[in-house]
Image (cartoon, helix red, strand yellow):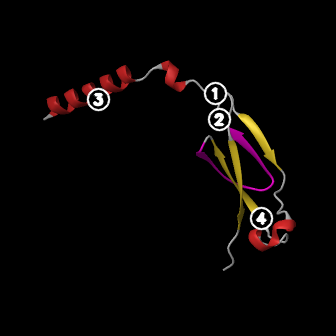
Amino acid sequence: MAKRLRFAALAASLLLIVSCSRESFEATTPAYLHIPSIQVDSTFYPTQGSAHSAITTAWIYANGKAVGVFELPATVPVPNSGPTLVEVYPGITMNG
């Protein structure tokens, strides 16, 4: 039983050591996006709501992948390199 356990531990550690490479651990320097606030354009009131919406969060997407939800004002790290399509959507807190 002890030999099997030792063999399993050795095989698992060998597999972990062989599968890791330095390239996969290299960190990229993120770009930072600062969003002080989000305001609703009140000229589109019938379709977009009133200008008095309490927008408290921003939903951030970079190249179609979610970066996160941040409380405003926010400084958001965008980890992508090169040209990046950034989408920002407003978020409001539900009552109750």
Q: Is residue 70 above or below residue 19?
A: below
Viewer-nearest residue: 18 or 34: 34
* Residue assigned mark 3: 12
Give how far apart the Cα atoms at labels 1 and 2 are: 7 Å
Residue 55: which numbered mark, if any? 4
Viewer-nearest residue: 50 or 19: 50
| Label 3 element class | helix
Residue 90 location in percent, x, y?
73, 59
Give how far apart the Cα atoms at labels 3 and 2 are: 32 Å
Residue positioned 29% across, 29% down in the render: 12
Give how far apart the Cα atoms at labels 4 and 3 are: 50 Å
Give how far apart the Cα atoms at labels 4 and 1 are: 31 Å
Quarter assignment of residue 31: top right
In the displayed structure image, the side of residue 48 where residue 67 appears, left or right: left
Residue 79: which numbered mark, if any? 2
Q: What kind of residue is marked 4? A: Ile
Give how far apart the Cα atoms at labels 4 and 2 are: 25 Å
* Residue assigned mark 1: 28
| Label 2 element class | loop
Q: Residues within 10 Å of mark 4 (few under 14, many from 20)?
A: some
Residue 67 location in percent, x, y?
63, 46
Mark 1 vs mark 2: which is more N-terminal? 1
Mark 3 vs mark 2: which is more N-terminal? 3
